[in-house]
Image (spheres, helix red, strand yellow):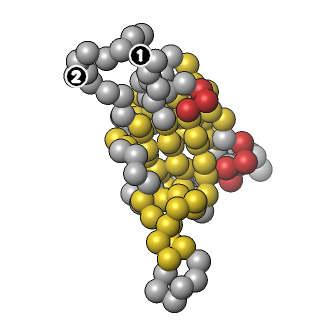
Amino acid sequence: MAEQTAALTTERTGTPDKTGGKSLATRDDAVYIAPPVDIFENEDSLIVVADLPGVEKEGVDIRVEDDILTIKGIAKYNQPATVLRQEFSLQNYYRQFQLSDEVDQSKILAESKNGVLTITLPKAEKSKPKQIKVKVG
């Protein structure tokens, strides 16, 4: 699994192409940072653990398209009162990874708990190690 860099696009807004046809997707106006991730491997799967502080379950968008795993998180913070001075703000998160054919994309699972996103990428049967028994003659 390799990290993939791609432009964040939106289908709702865009710039008309030069021929006057369909609008071309343009970059989203929101600012994104790449969340830190750890990737683990066991016999049955790859496990991606991403740190997404401030992102609730409803703010997580995980997609697989054209063998690219996309993680997008929208952080929310409910201000307790009127802001007098603000020295920090939560950032939104965006990261992509290229998936190999070792991953069974139909069985991907995700769980979010306390700002930590865990994505389980099960290995396809053909990529799991198999032991071959030797028969004695």
Disc 2 to disc 1, how far (Cα)? 13 Å
- Compared to residue 130, the image places residue 80 above or below, namely above
* Residue kind at label 2, given as amino acid type: Glu
Q: Residue at x 46, y 86 (%)?
A: 18
The quarter holding residue 22 reads bottom right
Tell which residue pokes out farthest to the bottom in this image: 19
Residue 79, disc: 1
Residue at screen point 55% across, 19% down? 113
Give percent across and percent down for residue 73: 49, 36
Question: Is 127 displayed left or right of 85 in the figure?
Answer: right
Quarter assignment of residue 118:
top right
User: As shown in the figure, which amino acid type bears the numbered disc 1?
Assistant: Gln
Point out which mark residue 14 bears: none
Do we see residue 12 in this rendering? yes
Residue 87 coordinates in the image, percent (x, y): 22, 22
The secondary element bearing badge 2 is classed as: loop
Q: Is residue 89 above or below residue 19?
A: above
Indicate whether 104 appears above or below 47: below
122 vs 42, nearest the viewer: 122
In the foreground, 125 or 53: 53
Let me know if residue 129 appears in the view.
no
Q: Quick one: which residue is furthest to the top in this view?
A: 80
Q: Is residue 8 left or right of residue 108?
A: left
79 in relation to 4, above or below: above
Q: Residue at x 66, y 41 (%)?
A: 108
| Label 2 packing within 10 angstroms: few (<14), some (14-19), many (20+) | few
- Name the residue rendered at 36%, 34% in the picture: 91
Q: Earlier in the sequence, mark 2 or mark 1?
A: 1
Identify the disc placed on residue 87.
2
Secondary structure of the residue carrying tag 1 is: loop
